[in-house]
Amino acid sequence: AQSVAQPEDQVNVAEGNPLTVKCTYSVSGNPYLFWYVQYPNRGLQFLLKYITGDNLVKGSYGFEAEFNKSQTSFHLKKPSALVSDSALYFCAVRDNFGNEKLTFGTGTRLTIIP
Amino acid sequence: AAGVIQSPRHLIKEKRETATLKCYPIPRHDTVYWYQQGPGQDPQFLISFYEKMQSDKGSIPDRFSAQQFSDYHSELNMSSLELGDSALYFCASSYSGRSNTGELFFGEGSRLTVL
């Protein structure tokens, strides 16, 4: 069964500093990995994905993520944090590209301190 | 661009009542997914439909049922509501064909409160 783990419930970063939100995955085949962001009382917004190709993927709002197969990780990063980045971030995995569901991690609450 | 539409956005029910949530996927999307997100929880997969047939089933209670109609919209029916059913219910859609981009597109959710 596929799964992702987000080891940190909460991450605090000073505005302007780089941020990292961690995610590790477990799948039986090739992983299809995603990051979503959720603002209070809102839906899940897609940030970026890794399907194949370059290990460093770039997404919305200046976020990027690095796929590391040997460490089975897909950490979310941003070089310079903004206060508006404060939100709940979910890592997710899909087994394949058909009609398979997404399985989410437990989420990491990112707080950017002014 | 058109997004996933969910209705109602907010719903308040009493225990043992019935509720129906609706989801209208992005045009041309053939797969619909339902998720339940409790307070402070990650979204939990309930059920999905592909081309109007159930394609996968997760932790959906027997009191809940869902279907996808000929126009691809989907409805989640919840009966004998319990306090623990209070949650944010998300619908997502995707296209499984050759132009599949991989991600699921989520609606804004329907917040159900059971009193």
Image (tube, rainbow, N blue to C red):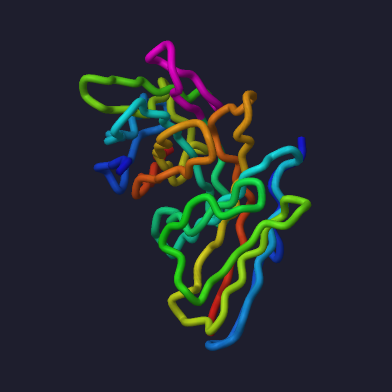
Q: Which residue lies furthest to the top in this view?
A: A54
Residue B81 image position (x, y, % from top left): 52, 81
Of the pair B10 and B36, the residue shown nearer to us:
B36
Q: In this view, does B71 lie to the left or right of A14?
A: right
Height in image: A22 above or below A50? below
Q: Which residue lies furthest to the front in this view?
A: B53
Q: What stretch is highlighted in magenta?
A: A48-61
Of the pair B74 and B82, the residue shown nearer to us:
B74
Q: In this view, does B21 lie to the left or right of A74?
A: right
Residue plotted at (43% across, 76% down)? B84
Q: Quadrant of residue B31?
A: top right
> Is-magenta flag for residue A112?
no
Of the pair B75 and A58, the residue shown nearer to us:
B75
Residue A54 image position (x, y, % from top left): 42, 11
Q: Quadrant of residue A12?
A: top left
Residue B40 image position (x, y, % from top left): 40, 60
Q: Count the labels in the image.
A: 0
Residue plotted at (52% across, 38% down)? A84
Height in image: B42 above or below A81? below
Q: Quadrant of the N terminus of chain B?
A: top right
Residue plotted at (61% across, 71% down)? B77
Residue A45 image position (x, y, % from top left): 56, 40
